[in-house]
Image (cartoon, grey):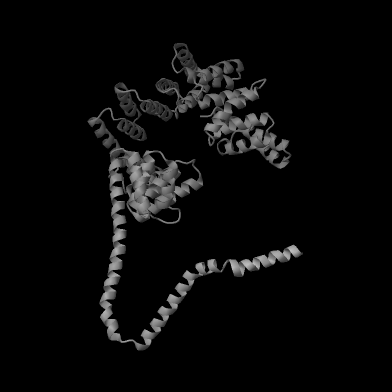
């Protein structure tokens, strides 16, 4: 206790004897300001009581001069900043035009720092970030220039719409893209980029009347919009308008090819337009001429697709001549571009048709393998066909060779995984190892999800299998195997009602033999 008393008295001594000088030093400025304020207030009260307005009037010019001087001083500072920002912006634009993107970014970042609200500088900076593939910085700028809640900058809204359209297609991404394009059109009613993108979006989502409305505004000045407009009109049952715009597009591409026969964009545009007009032979001839001048995979794929569509146009008749012509077209398509899965699907259907043409198709595929032409896809088709005809040894041989010939082709890995899971005995571990990388690369493709779901179901991983199989039902709701697998999974998890429903659907589908035969080709995904 005595020690505490001594400490207390020591503190009191410091307060009254040790700190007064320091206290006065710190308090002096505060006291001065208080005295100055009190004195000025007293002076103002004295002036107010003894004021003479003529002195105030005499001082007004000086007050006005003082105010104007302050205004011009402030304006000069801001003007200097604006001029400096303009210089940085001009330098950035020159560097951007010359392809010096690093310098452009340096200048434009400085312009934005000086004037954060300068939309021109921000937009040019966004263009620079796009050139340098700085996606994070580009998106940050677009969120300012093209926010979600209000229209700000039309080109930025169009570019952000493109960003949403490049994401995996969902209702949310499509809705966000549409909102951005509508904002762009609110700012610039006839913005051609926004109209083009919105027209394409409407066409792809089945909103054909809106697509016609948007694309018709730009088709005269944008030849690329004429074929999409024709397709939209055709889907809206305006066949006369569709033909008129398609013929107009065909004329435009023909003129371009006359000027430059090697123009790849014109070759592709002309062939697609002629296919729409069902002039398949002309489309194929144009592409063959283009391939004589240059080897371009885009032209090969377009020619293959043209030949497949030509064969499809003959599918309404199943007579010998029709089947033979379809075989000729599909075999040509397979040789031109072996990796087109549409060709795989159509050749599978031809093999299942039976008869002389099917036998000729099989001989053609065997000749391909023997002569080293389209080896991977030929093995794949023969292996898939052997699986359907319950010839497991031949199926395994061809599918394994297909994987060796085309190890990066997802459809090959998918079909081999399906075969390994369903052969006797199954090789589930290898099947899963084959299909997992494919699903990782194509996570939204229900063909591959369906295969993995079946593999997981056979491995007893029922919850994971249900996730894949239910997603795949969007496409494979008419396939009995998918419902049977779901029935087994739900039964294993104790959900008897859902298991019974899926089993009932699977039984009904199995009873519909014709439908099951049509659907069975879907097991090896197109």
Q: Is residue 87 visible?
A: yes
Compare residues 365 and 120 and report the one nearer the observer.
120
Give how far across and how far down residue 274 sits, in percent: 33, 33
Among all residues in the image, which is located at the extreme right?
1
Q: Quadrant of residue 12?
A: bottom right
The image shows residue 8, relative to residue 303, as above or below, that is: below
Give how far across and how far down residue 211 sits, in percent: 39, 47
In the rendered view, does 394 fall on the left or right side of 318? right
Q: Quadrant of residue 419?
A: top right
Among all residues in the image, which is located at the extreme bottom?
50
Q: Residue at x 35, y 88 (%)?
A: 50
Compare residues 71 and 111 and report the one nearer the observer.
71
Q: Residue at x 41, y 20 (%)?
A: 335
In the rendered view, does 68 fall on the left or right side of 235? left
Compare residues 437 and 33 and report the one nearer the observer.
33
The image shows residue 200, relative to residue 353, as above or below, that is: below
In the rendered view, does 427 fall on the left or right side of 1? left
* Quarter the N terminus occupies: bottom right
Among all residues in the image, which is located at the extreme left?
259
In the rendered view, does 57 fall on the left or right side of 20? left
Q: Residue at x 63, y 30 (%)?
A: 454
Among all residues in the image, which is located at the extreme top?
370
Give how far across and how far down residue 353 sits, in percent: 51, 23
Q: Is residue 243 visible?
A: no
Q: Residue at x 57, y 66 (%)?
A: 19
Compare residues 487 and 182 and report the one nearer the observer.
182
């Amino acid at each position: 206790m005595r020690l505490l008393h001594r400490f207390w008295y020591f503190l009191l001594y410091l307060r009254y004897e040790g700190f007064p000088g320091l206290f006065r030093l710190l308090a002096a400025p505060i006291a001065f300001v208080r005295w100055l304020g009190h004195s000025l207030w007293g002076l103002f009260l004295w002036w107010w009581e003894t004021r003479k307005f003529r002195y105030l009037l005499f001082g007004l010019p000086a007050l006005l001069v003082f105010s104007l001087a302050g205004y011009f001083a402030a304006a000069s500072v801001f003007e200097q900043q604006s001029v400096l920002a303009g210089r940085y912006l001009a330098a950035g634009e020159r560097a951007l035009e010359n392809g010096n993107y690093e310098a452009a970014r340096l200048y434009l970042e400085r312009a934005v720092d000086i004037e954060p609200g300068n939309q021109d500088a921000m937009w040019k900076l966004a263009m620079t970030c796009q050139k340098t593939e700085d996606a994070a910085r580009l998106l940050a700028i677009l969120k300012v220039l093209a926010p979600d809640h209000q229209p700000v900058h039309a080109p930025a809204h169009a570019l952000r719409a493109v960003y949403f359209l490049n994401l995996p297609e969902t209702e949310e991404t499509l809705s966000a893209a549409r909102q951005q394009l509508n904002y762009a059109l609110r700012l610039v009613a006839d913005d051609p980029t926004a109209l083009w993108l919105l027209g394409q979006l409407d066409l792809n989502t089945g909103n054909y009347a809106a697509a016609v409305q948007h694309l018709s505004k730009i088709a005269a000045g944008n030849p690329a919009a004429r074929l999409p407009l024709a397709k939209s009109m055709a889907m809206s049952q305006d066949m006369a308008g569709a033909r008129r715009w398609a013929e107009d597009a065909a004329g435009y591409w023909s003129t371009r090819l006359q000027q430059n026969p090697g123009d790849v964009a014109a070759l592709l545009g002309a062939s697609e337009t002629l296919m729409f007009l069902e002039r398949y032979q002309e489309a194929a001839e144009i592409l063959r001429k283009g391939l004589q001048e240059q080897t371009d995979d885009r032209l090969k794929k377009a020619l293959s697709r043209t030949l497949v569509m030509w064969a499809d146009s003959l599918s309404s008749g199943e007579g010998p001549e029709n089947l033979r012509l379809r075989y000729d077209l599909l075999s040509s398509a397979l040789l031109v571009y072996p990796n087109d899965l549409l060709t795989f699907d159509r050749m599978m259907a031809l093999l299942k048709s039976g008869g002389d043409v099917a036998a000729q198709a099989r001989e053609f595929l065997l000749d391909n393998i023997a002569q080293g032409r389209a080896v991977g896809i030929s093995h794949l088709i023969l292996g898939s066909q052997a699986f359907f005809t319950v010839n497991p040894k031949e199926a395994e041989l061809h599918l394994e060779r297909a994987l060796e010939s085309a190890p990066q082709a997802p459809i090959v890995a998918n079909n081999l995984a399906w075969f390994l899971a369903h052969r006797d005995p199954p090789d589930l571990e290898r099947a899963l190892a084959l299909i997992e990388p494919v699903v990782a690369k194509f996570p939204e493709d229900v063909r591959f999800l369906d295969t993995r779901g079946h593999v997981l179901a056979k491995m007893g991983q029922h919850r994971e299998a249900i996730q894949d199989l239910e997603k795949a039902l969007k496409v494979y709701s008419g396939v009995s195997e998918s419902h049977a697998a779901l029935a087994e999974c739900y039964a294993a998890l104790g959900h008897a009602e859902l298991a019974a429903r899926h089993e009932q659907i699977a039984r009904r589908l199995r009873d519909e033999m014709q439908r099951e035969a049509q659907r069975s080709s879907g097991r090896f995904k197109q």
